[in-house]
Amino acid sequence: MVRKYALPLLAVLGVVIALWMVKEGSKPSIHAKPVAEPPRVEFVNRISGAGIVEASTRNISVGAHLPGIVARVHVRVGERVRAGAPLFSIDDRARRADLAVREARVREAEANLQDLQAQLEIAEKVKDPRAISVEDLNKRRFAVQAAEARLANAAAEVRAAQVDLDLLTVRAPVDGAVLQVNVRPGEYAASGVTAQPLVLLGSLERLHVRVDIDENDAWRFTEKSRAVAYVRGNPNLKTDLRFEYVENYVVPKRSLTGESTERVDTRVMQVVYSFSRSDLSVFPGQLMDVFIEDRSAQAPTAKKADGEAKKP
């Protein structure tokens, strides 16, 4: 009896579920609203590119001249420094001890030179050629010259030690602001190229925007074209850009947007613009959407209009 009614009920239930699934699947998909509205660009024809904000002096990765343990950090993030101001110092006790040894050698060389000079003076005052031979007199003169050379060499070693001692204090190469401090007292500071800069420095009075223009659009770019940059996340924050220069070498694209149509093997032409930080408060390393007016697309239209005007 149960089997008699169970199979029809299961069949009806399956039909109902299938109809419900068809109905749900036919509903239009609801697209998620964007986090921020895209910028509304007034250029009819334009070139777009991703721009990264950097200091007008470029972001200077300050490293250490000589490796060692950091003894003191003199600056903080956001602090403005003048050229030559100390940024951090490396432990200099070993270098100071070496300098003291070299200075002692200088004093020893000076004393030895004075002794030899005094002996030479006594020998040269002897008038009787039988009392001292010419050979002995020449030996004394050569000994003085050798002592003078040893003194000069010891003095040069002192100056070299002083230079090494001075290099243990890393100083700011230009006027600017401290963007990053990635070293602490007690940490080892390696010389040469490091994975991250020990101190990142740059001038923020006027910021630069480095824009990547796709190689397929590079021919459309002109230096006199107007350019506008928008802050990502808020299209109401924008500023006009002033052209600075174009990098003369096309490089592989590094800043990826993640779009499905994006090619990873694309090469880009880098164009540098600038703007005053008082016009737009952004930070170095921040990404911006840059749009450049494409004047090349207007040229054919203008030529065509001129040609039609010349027709009788």
Image: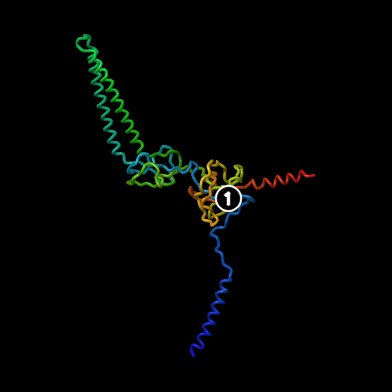
Q: Position of residue 148 (x, y in %)?
A: 29, 22
In front here: 106 or 18?
Answer: 18
Q: Residue at x 48, y 49 (%)?
A: 285
Q: Position of residue 269 (x, y in %)?
A: 54, 45
Type of amino acid under label 1 = Ser
In the displayed structure image, the side of residue 125 where residue 23 appears, left or right: right
In the displayed structure image, the side of residue 294 where residue 114 appears, left or right: left
Placement of the C terminus among the 4 image quadrants: top right
* Crowdedness near tag 1: few (<14), some (14–19) or many (≥20) residues, C-alpha within 10 Å: many
In the displayed structure image, the side of residue 142 where residue 304 appears, left or right: right
Q: Residue at x 58, y 54 (%)?
A: 39
In front here: 7 or 92?
Answer: 7
Q: Position of residue 242 (x, y in %)?
A: 57, 43
In the displayed structure image, the side of residue 84 where residue 288 appears, left or right: right
Above or below, comparing residue 6 to residue 289 in the picture: below
User: Residue furthest toward the right?
Assistant: 312
Give SS at disc 1: strand
User: Residue furthest toward the left?
Assistant: 131
Q: Quadrant of residue 136?
A: top left
How many dots with numbers? Answer: 1
Q: Quadrant of residue 34?
A: bottom right
Q: Residue at x 51, y 83 (%)?
A: 10
Colour pattern of the rendering: rainbow
Above or below, comparing residue 32 to residue 44 in the picture: below
Q: Disc 1 designates what residue?
A: 48
